[in-house]
Image (tube, helix red, strand yellow):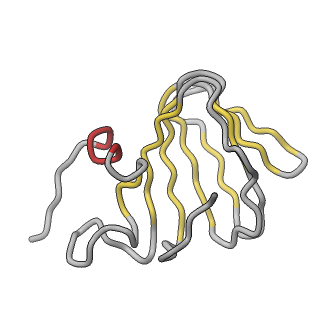
Amino acid sequence: MRVYVGNAVTDGAGDDGWLLGHFKPDGDIRHSRDVEIKWGVHAAGEERARWVTGEWRTALLVLISGRFWVELPGRSVLLAERGDYVVWGEGVDHSWRAEQESVVMTVRWPSVAGYKVP
């Protein structure tokens, strides 16, 4: 039986918050080409410097704590209550901003080797 027990804060600190995806070593139970999971810890005022454009994956972002804005074309979504979430599909450009210190969990699929948003 393959099992990994960890802590999202500790494990995520070593890989920009990413806990599971193609970037984990082959043979590691956290290695996946199907899905990526991130534990994102963001300081108040932190924001994505540039919009993500041309994205062809689907993403789910869940608020754990804080107040977090997701910017989508023609729409701003505020995640304010624990458990609030937003899902967007392929072709949807996006950006984000942490209004307060925030923790969010991102699930994105599929996991694409070599892909990194600037």
Q: Residue at the far left: name it.
A: 1
User: Who is closer to the viewer here, 96 or 77?
Assistant: 96
User: Who is closer to the viewer here, 3 or 83?
Assistant: 3
- Quadrant of the frame with the C terminus: bottom right
Q: In the image, residue 73 lies at what x, y percent?
A: 86, 52
Q: In the image, residue 42 lies at what x, y percent?
A: 52, 33
Q: Name the residue at 68% across, 73% down.
A: 56
Q: In the image, residue 102 lies at what x, y percent?
A: 53, 29
Q: Name the residue at 74% across, 52% down.
A: 94
User: Who is closer to the viewer here, 3 or 38?
Assistant: 38
Relative placement, left or right, of 79 versus 104 is: right
Q: How many marks?
A: 0
Q: Name the residue at 70% across, 68% down.
A: 55
Q: Is residue 55 above or below residue 51?
A: below
Q: In the image, residue 92 lies at what x, y percent?
A: 77, 62
Q: Name the residue at 63% across, 70% down.
A: 57
User: Who is closer to the viewer here, 65 or 96?
Assistant: 96
- Quadrant of the frame with the N terminus: bottom left
Quadrant of residue 91 within the rendered picture: bottom right
Quadrant of residue 97 within the rendered picture: top right
Relative placement, left or right, of 5 versus 116 is: left
Q: Residue at the far right: name it.
A: 74
Q: Is residue 101 above or below residue 4?
A: above
Quadrant of residue 77 within the rendered picture: top right
Relative placement, left or right, of 17 versus 53 is: left
Q: Is residue 37 above or below residue 22?
A: above
